[in-house]
Image (cartoon, helix red, strand yellow):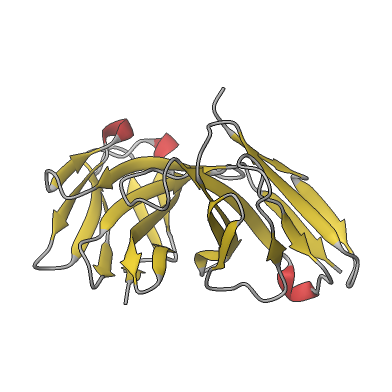
């Protein structure tokens, strides 16, 4: 089944403890992206990647890192999480390099709480 | 610059009555426009997309949207609401911008359907 898989789905952590949220897609998509969803703000883009080894900042990149060493994986790294990073995170992918005609396929989401 | 404004944060309708969810956009280029739906505790699912073909776009579950360039609008409609339509709906604009490519989400409209 074609899908985007995120892990973990739920995580509670403490301030400053490094964590990684993994994202993997099995559709050979070039474009991958991370979003955070907060009430009343919709989804805001954190980072995106046009292809392997090509990443760029979205609208809210502060406090996050990403890497794209393989086409299928796009992990989101929080080096030193803070409470304001408590949010619902979504990974998404699409076939081509951000083409507007290509539909985003979303993962199921990862709910992160930072105490 | 690109932006998306969903004019209502909440819409409440009775089952069997029409649904109208409003979206206005701003884009320096010819945009691609999408509507996504998010059911509780689920990821986002594509409802429909506009990519400069027909201005009236039909999607899944009886939804449709009309692209009106003169009004910079892309409102989502459905003739008769069903209880299963209760969810959050996001209007999305994508397109090129100087130095890259952007995907921008509206803040979302939560649809309530009363029996």
Image coordinates of residue A110 in percent, x first then y, are: 70, 50
Q: Residue at x 73, y 66 (%)?
A: A86
- Left or right, A31 with respect to A70, comes to left
Task: Please say whether residue A43 is visible from this viewpoint.
Answer: yes
Residue A62: x, y in percent? Answer: 67, 76
Identify the residue shown where x is 19% and y is 42%.
B57
Q: Position of residue B56 (x, y in %)?
A: 13, 45
Q: Nearer the viewer, residue A82 or B27?
A: B27
Asked if residue A94 lies left or right of residue A100, the reply is: right
Residue A28 versus residue B2 in the image, above or below: above
Q: Position of residue A21 (x, y in %)?
A: 75, 52
- Vertical order, B75 against A22 (above or below): below
Please name the residue shown 65% across and 56% down the image: A89
* Vertical placement of residue B80 versus A47, above or below: above
Dividing the picture into quadrants, the one containing residue B74 is bottom left
**Residue at the top extreme?**
A1
Identify which residue, A111 or B83, lies in the foreground: A111
Name the side, left or right, on which B27 lies relative to B106.
left
Residue B9 in view: no
The quadrant of the image that shows the C terminus of chain B is top left
């Amino acid at each position: 089944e074609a899908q985007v898989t995120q892990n973990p789905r739920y995580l509670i952590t403490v301030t400053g403890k490094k964590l990684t949220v993994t994202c993997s897609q099995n559709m050979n998509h070039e474009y991958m992206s991370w979003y955070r969803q907060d009430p009343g703000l919709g989804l805001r883009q954190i980072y995106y990647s046009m292809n392997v080894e090509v990443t760029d900042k979205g609208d809210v990149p502060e406090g996050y890192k990403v890497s794209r060493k393989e086409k299928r994986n796009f992990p989101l790294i929080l080096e030193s999480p803070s409470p304001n990073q408590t949010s619902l995170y979504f990974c998404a992918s699409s076939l081509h390099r951000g083409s507007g005609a290509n539909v985003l396929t979303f993962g199921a989401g990862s709910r992160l709480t930072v105490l | 610059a690109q932006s998306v404004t969903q004019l209502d944060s909440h819409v409440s309708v009775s089952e069997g009555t029409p649904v109208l969810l409003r979206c206005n956009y701003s884009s320096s280029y010819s945009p691609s426009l999408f509507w996504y739906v998010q059911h509780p505790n689920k990821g986002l699912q594509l409802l429909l997309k506009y990519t400069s073909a027909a201005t009236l776009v039909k999607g899944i579950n009886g939804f449709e949207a009309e692209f009106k360039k003169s009004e910079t609008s892309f409102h989502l409609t459905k003739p008769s609401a069903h209880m299963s339509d209760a969810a959050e709906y996001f209007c999305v604009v994508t397109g090129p911008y100087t130095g890259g490519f952007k995907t921008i989400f509206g803040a979302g409209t939560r649809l309530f359907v009363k029996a």
